[in-house]
Image (cartoon, rainbow, N blue to C red):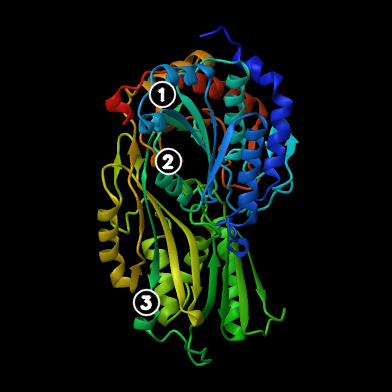
Amino acid sequence: MKDIDWSSEVTRRQDALMRDLSSLLAIPSVKDVATIAPGMPLGVESARALAYMLDLAKREGLHTATIDGIVGYAEYKSTEYEEKTEVAPETAEELQDDYIAVLCHVDVVPASGEWTSPPFEPTIRDGKLYARGTIDDKGPAIAALYGLLIVKELGLPLRHRVRLIVGTDEETGMNCMEAYNRHEHPPLAGFTPDADFPIVHAEKGQVNSRMTLNLQRLGDGDQLVDPNQDFFKLQSFQSGTAENMVPDLAEAVIHATAPRLETLSTSFKSYCANKGLVGEIVFDSNEQNADTAILRMEGKSTHGMAPETGNNAGLRLMEFLYEHSFTGNDEHFIKGAVELLAGDTSGEALGIACSDEVMGPLTVNVGLLRYEPLNGEAFFHLNIRFPACTNGEIIVSTMESRIGGYGFGLTPPTLKPSHQVPADHPMITTLQAIYTEQTGQEATLLSTGGGTYACKLAGCVAFGPLFPGELDTAHQADEFIAIDSLMKATALYARAIYELANLDYPEQIAR
């Protein structure tokens, strides 16, 4: 390898990198079904973000392509690669397989919560760049692109092609990678800059399903408030904006007689004070004699892979309602929430708790809570992340038997198996050597509850961008990336691309 100062190469390009990143961050690329159109299966802004990334790559002389409007790639092959294929011709299929992948995504989760500065107006404060997507995953995507461009501009020889794969559906199902795999051959190996440094070589599997209340079977959900009976009526309940986020806001609409609502108001204020929660209660007509009250609760949003680090506003509000008298469907919905889900991110009450040494414990995030009985809607969306000691089929079967007694069932689940790349894979040992040499730190192998693109391609791992000890603000208000860390990551990506594209990949490992 040439004697290359990778950090200096990044520093020379820092201003351009920051300009390109800021423009990408300004695109609110949240999945939007209202703007779906031909060639834009996830909406206008997601398509615009994908086009922006590919246009940047094309501007720099990379070959680009899009697939089904949902994913694209930018590819580079050096002169040495072209000479190799001319001198030693192989079959067409082998040539298609001969590439290293760097997997990124440009879609983002909704920008909920209170932001210090607008989430799609990139702002620098105290050496940090704030905006939705800075750490997950637009900042790392631009860093990876610039890493590839450094390799290209230095004219470094590569034995294998390199593809920067850019998806737009990572946050809401990874259908983009399904589309990619339908059309393209898998890579020899690769990484995604969408987790933590040093190297995440193991990812938990996932179960996504809605735990739905059978309103028709239970009946009696439309009872009216009788002044001679001591109960409340839950007219509606809303909490959460994305399945893979911990909800930070919740709202319940309660109907009751005026005296009972007055008592409820006092009780709610006391509950919030005792629990250290932020909440409010307002009356429909702003009068104490109104018969409808709206209760609002605040929590703390965080990534669904670590629900124990957040505070689920929906479940906290459900716990308050559990202390009061409801009947029929209202009672069943609240009881199911509290007795099966609240205060339990490990799945103990559902009977699915487990853990292993590599991946750690199973986690349960209740990302969406909805109750609109007049519209026939009553469900909790469960985002479950499990280690290799169990599997999705066992989890689903166990839950179905446990929740049935509460009047709940499961919608057909989406299952993703756990993913692990062996520690002796040549790509992993190479990345470990690169990380240790450039940072001076031990390159410990990690596991995650997060689901990254790595799980969609054999031989792929997650590599950064978050360095040990740094605060992870993905999926939170005031999401940021430290600019110095972004530049360090870019240097690591440049060298990783160069070295991975020159490795030998034995047939039994690569295929």
Q: Are marks 2 and 1 in contact (CB under 8 Å)?
A: no
| Occupied quadrant, residue 51 | top right
Q: Nearer the viewer's eye, disc 2 or disc 1?
A: 2
Q: Are marks 1 and 3 in contact (CB under 8 Å)?
A: no
Q: Position of residue 310 (x, y in %)?
A: 52, 49
Q: Residue drawn 59% across and 79% down? A: 261
Is the residue marked by circle 3 packed among few (<14), some (14-19), or many (20+) residues within 10 Å? many
- Give the labeled residue for mark 2: 184
| Occupied quadrant, residue 361 | top left
- Give the labeled residue for mark 3: 214
* Label at residue 444: 1
Q: Residue drawn 64% across and 34% down? A: 58
Residue extending farthest to the top is 3
Label 3 residue SS = loop
Residue 197 seen anywhere in this rendered image of the structure: no
Q: Residue drawn 36% across and 25% down? A: 90
